[in-house]
Amino acid sequence: MIGILSDSHDNLPAVRRAVRFFKETECRLVIHAGDFVAPFAAKELAEAGCPVKAVFGNCDGERAGLTAAIEPFGTIRDAPLEFTCGGLRAAIVHLDASAAALSARQKYDVVIFGHTHKPEVRRSGKTLLVNPGETGGWISGTSTVALFDPKTGRAEIVPI
C-alpha cells in the first residue's frame, strides 16, 4: 500500500493521525502532494517508517528547510516528481491544472495531486487521478488521506 496526503498546512495532530494510519496499514511508501507549510510538520513523516516522496506546494515557502527536514528519509522537489512503483508509471504534482495536463498525455498510470482540498479519485482515460483532499482539515473540517494499491491500481479516500 501507498499512503497519500496533501495540504496538511501545519496541522500536527492531523499529520500524526495520518502517519499512525499509514503505519497501521503497513504502507511501504508515503506521498505528500504539497503544502506542508513548515519543516516541523514535514519531520513528522519520518515516523511512518518508510520512504517519503513529496513535491512543493504553493504554500511551501521554506523550501531549504523542508528539503533538510525530509532528506534523511525521503525526497522533496518541484513538481512533477515522476517515479515507477510496482511497474506503474506515476507522477506527483500539487496543482490540479498540472494533474489535468499530465493525465491528458496518457503517459502515467496514476497522477497524484492536491491543492483543491477536495478528495477525489477518478479516471481520465487510462490515468487514475488521486487527490487525497486536505489532511489539515482547516477548510472542510474533515481530515482525509488516500490509500493506493499499486497491485490493483485502485485508490480510496479515508477520513482520519
Image: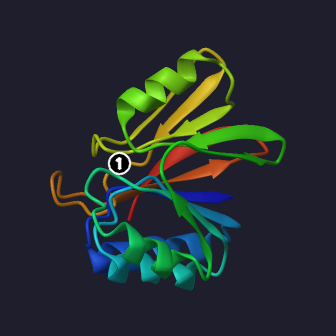
Residue 123 vs residue 142: left or right?
A: right
Q: Residues within 10 Å of mark 1 (few under 14, many from 20)?
A: many
In this rendering, is residue 159 above or below 155? Answer: below
Above or below, 2 against 92 in this view is below
| Of residues 17 and 86, the one drawn nearer to the viewer in this rendering | 86
Query: In the image, residue 6 lies at what x, y percent?
Result: 39, 55
As drawn, 75 above or below 151:
below
78 vs 89: above or below: below
Q: Is residue 111 visible?
A: yes
Which of the colour schemes (rainbow, by chain, secondary structure, one colour) is used? rainbow
Q: Quadrant of the C terminus?
A: bottom left
Quadrant of the rendering where the N terminus is positioned: bottom right
Residue 28, position as x, y percentages in the image:
71, 67
Residue sitting at 73 percent across and 37 percent down?
Answer: 89
Horizontal side of residue 159 vs 124, given as left or right:
left
Q: How many marks?
A: 1
Q: Residue furthest front?
A: 64
| Residue carrying label 1 | 133
Of residues 1 and 81, the one nearer the viewer is 81
Left or right, residue 142 beside residue 82 = left
- Is 35 in front, or is 153? 35
Q: Amino acid at mark 1?
A: Gly
Residue drawn at 37 percent across, 33 percent down: 96
Identify the residue shown where x is 55% and y is 82%.
Answer: 46
Q: Percent from the top left, x then y, of residue 61?
A: 27, 63
Determine whether the residue tagged by mark 1 lies in a helix, strand or loop. Answer: loop
- Tell me the quarter of the picture where residue 59 sits: bottom left
Residue 123 visible here? no
Q: Position of residue 80 (x, y in %)?
A: 54, 42
